[in-house]
Amino acid sequence: MDREKLNHYKQLLLDMKEEAKKELGENDKSYNLSKEYPDDSIGEVTNYDNHPADLGTEMFEREKAATLNSQARQRISEIEHALDKIEKGKYGYSEASGKPIPEERLEIEPTARYLVEEVDNE
């Protein structure tokens, strides 16, 4: 793959990484996920005056945000792996067979590690 195409994919990956980091920050800010106690995320000192259904909703939203953060972290890990492959000159090749990954696939999923037919076999 030529340098121009590699730079194109590198920029796509960097943009994806920035977006994933932004998602992490928004979830942390919205739900105070950095807090140790769940009640801290809703800004309550006590649960005394809250209806149990309200607490359930808050816990659901907090867990949803934590799941989204986990997915964003996984995406960042995949992106960093692809960026590392660019630096090592191994980007765009299947990790299973070593065959080139079609550019159409890389355009859709720049973090692709395998050919489509190799993914179907797993």
Image: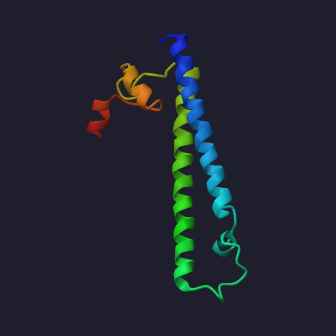
- Identify which residue is drawn at 54% across, 20% down: 8
Q: Would residue 101 be seen by someone viewing this image from the given angle? A: no
Of residues 89 and 75, the one drawn nearer to the viewer in this rendering: 75
Number of numbered tags placed on the structure image: 0
In percent of width and height, residue 43 lies at 71, 73
Residue 86 visible somewhere in the drawing: yes
**Outermost residue toward the bottom?**
48
Q: Nearer the viewer, residue 114 or 72?
A: 72
The residue under the point 36% across, 20% down is 99
* Left or right: where 51 falls relative to 92: right
The quarter of the displayed image where residue 96 is located: top left
Hey, which residue is sitting farthest top in the picture? 2
The quadrant the C terminus occupies is top left
Looking at the image, is 42 positioned above or below residue 78?
below
Residue 113 position, x and y percent, is 42, 31
The colour scheme is rainbow
Give above or below for 6 relative to 72: above
At which x and y percent is residue 49?
65, 88
Residue at x 55% of width, y 11% of height: 3
Depicted 77 relative to depicted 12: above or below: below
In percent of width and height, residue 37 lies at 67, 72
Which residue is pictured at 66% across the width and 51% down the height?
25
